[in-house]
Amino acid sequence: MQLVSEKGVVSSRDLDFLASSFARMRLQGRHLCTDAITGNMDEDCRLWFLKRYDFYVEQLKGKELQ
């Protein structure tokens, strides 16, 4: 799947990788500002990215508790 914006085509695989990476960073205690991360994304990309980011945060939290 590719997400199209005015600035070009972004692969959902790339955004998924970034979402999982930022989720790991957050759980390592790093301060992240999702507004800064998604600031240049169009609305569709931003919503998709944040959904995947939240998914990975919850998934990784669950693994920590096990």
Image: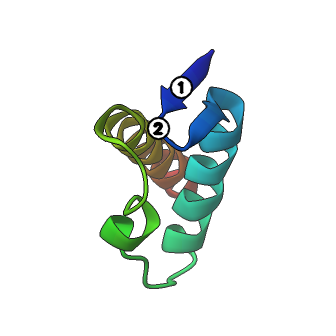
Give the image location of residue 19, x and y in percent.
56, 49
Give me the residue at 70% from left, 31% from top: 13
Depth order, front residue of 43/12: 43
Which secondary structure, mark 1? strand
Determine the residue located farthest toward the top in the rendered image.
1
Residue 15, label in figure: none
In the image, 19: left or right of 52? right
In the image, 52: left or right of 17? left
**Number of numbered discs present?**
2
In the image, residue 38 above or below residue 20: below
Which kind of residue does numbered mark 2 sit on? Answer: Glu
Which kind of residue does numbered mark 1 sit on? Answer: Leu
Give the image location of residue 21, x and y in percent.
65, 58
Depth order, front residue of 48/30: 48
In the image, residue 40 above or below residue 48: below
Give me the residue at 54% from left, 50% from top: 60
* Neighbour tally class for label 1: few under 14, some 14-19, many 20 plus, Cα within 10 Å: some
Reading the image, the residue beneath label 2 is 6
Reading the image, the residue beneath label 1 is 3
| Cα gap from disc 2 to disc 1, whole angstroms | 10 Å
Quadrant for the N terminus, please: top right
In the image, residue 66 above or below residue 40: above
Give me the residue at 69% from left, 45% from top: 17
Give the image location of residue 5, x and y in percent.
47, 34
